[in-house]
Image: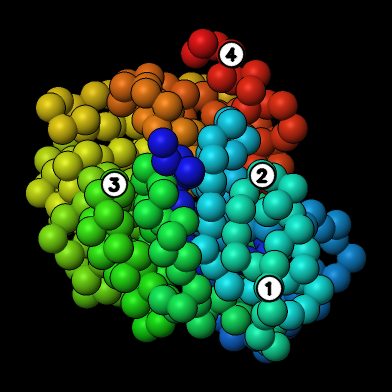
Amino acid sequence: MSEYDVYGVGHALVDMEFKVDDAFLDTIGVEKGTMALVDHDRQEEIVKALTGRSVERACGGSAANSIIGVAQFGGRAFHACKVAADEAGDFFASDMKADGVNHPLDGERQAGATGRCLVLITPDAERTLITNLGISELVSPDDLDEAALKQAKYLYVEGYLVSSPSARAAAVQALEMARAAGVKTALTFSDVNMIKFFRDGFEEMIGSGLDLIFCNEAEALEFTGADDINSACQALRKRADHVAITLGNKGAVLHDGQQQIDIPGIMVDAVDTNGAGDMFAGAFLYGITQGFDFEQAGKLACQAASVLVTQFGARLKSGQALDILKKFG
């Protein structure tokens, strides 16, 4: 029996979520709906501009959010990442443990600054991310726990790792370890800008192919060059046995290796889309590691994401995941 359902590899960021308006984004010169990597000084400038606004803080990062989702549904999860020996690093490690996720952060840590992500939410529920990776940019193969990885059903790799050489090396090595150990491999593209600026890095991570690719509609079209989502799905099948493409409130398009499956959307009044794709992946991975077929897992994932976007924050509240799961019992 596998010790873990999912072993994640990704950046470790402390999310700081603020409510803003479009005028604020114009003032700081940031494009709405994107993720921008900035240095410490630039992020501090924006933090100062946000003075006086209320903030919600939680451990985050694309893969971290998904792995927490797996654990919230009752799955067994491990997350490989890197934080510094600072207050933010202590907060991240404690918050992950509180969410039921194992990690390698309890030992001695390096000096430095733990990564932060400013999550700016506009009234239309769109999220804009201003990220300084801090020490997380230095995550490397040394931060992998090979024994834990070999005891997982799935490896889940965050696409944001493509942006730094050491992090990309960690992703590539984790994928090689997983293939050698017979652990299934999954990758999320994470952000369309990652594809635009680091295409070669994604090619390196995909390598000989994956078991599962997660992406949204924009990422699918950008990576494949296709004109429509069905063509994109078929093109992605050349790189992975299985595909999961999220379409926002229009649902999702899946391919289970045999057929394409359309999952209908769920209409809700969204207030915050931050983490919706991460929650979809987490719930989906929970489903397929517990014996759900792709259609069942897709419906569970869409339900989880639809609940998430009706409230602020990148994770479900206590008990919500189990309430959702009861409908699929």
Nearer to us of marks 1 and 4 is: 1
How packed mark 3 is, by other alpha carbons closer than 10 Å (few <14, some 14-19, many 20 or more), is: some
| Residue type pointed to by label 4 | Lys
Q: Position of residue 313 (x, y in %)?
A: 69, 46
Q: Is residue 154 left or right of residue 254?
A: right
Front: mark 4 or 3: 3
- Say which quarter of the image contains residue 72: top right
At 65% across and 19% down in the image, what residue appears? 323
Residue at mark 3: 184
Q: Given this view, does label 2 or label 1 mark the residue nearer the observer? A: 1
Q: Residue at x 21, y 30 (%)?
A: 256
Badge number at residue 107 = 1
> How many neighbours does mark 1 have within 10 angstroms: few (below 14), some (14-19), or many (20 or more)?
few
Check disc 2 and report the residue beneath it: 100
- Report the Cα–Cα distance between label 4 and label 3: 27 Å
Q: Nearer the viewer, residue 277 or 59?
A: 59
Looking at the rendered structure, the kind of residue marked 1 is Gly
| Residue depicted at 38% across the width and 73% down the height | 170
Q: Which mark is residue 229?
A: none
- Residue 127 shows up from this direction: no
Nearer the camera: disc 4 or disc 2: 2
Residue name at image x 81 percent, y 58 percent: 55
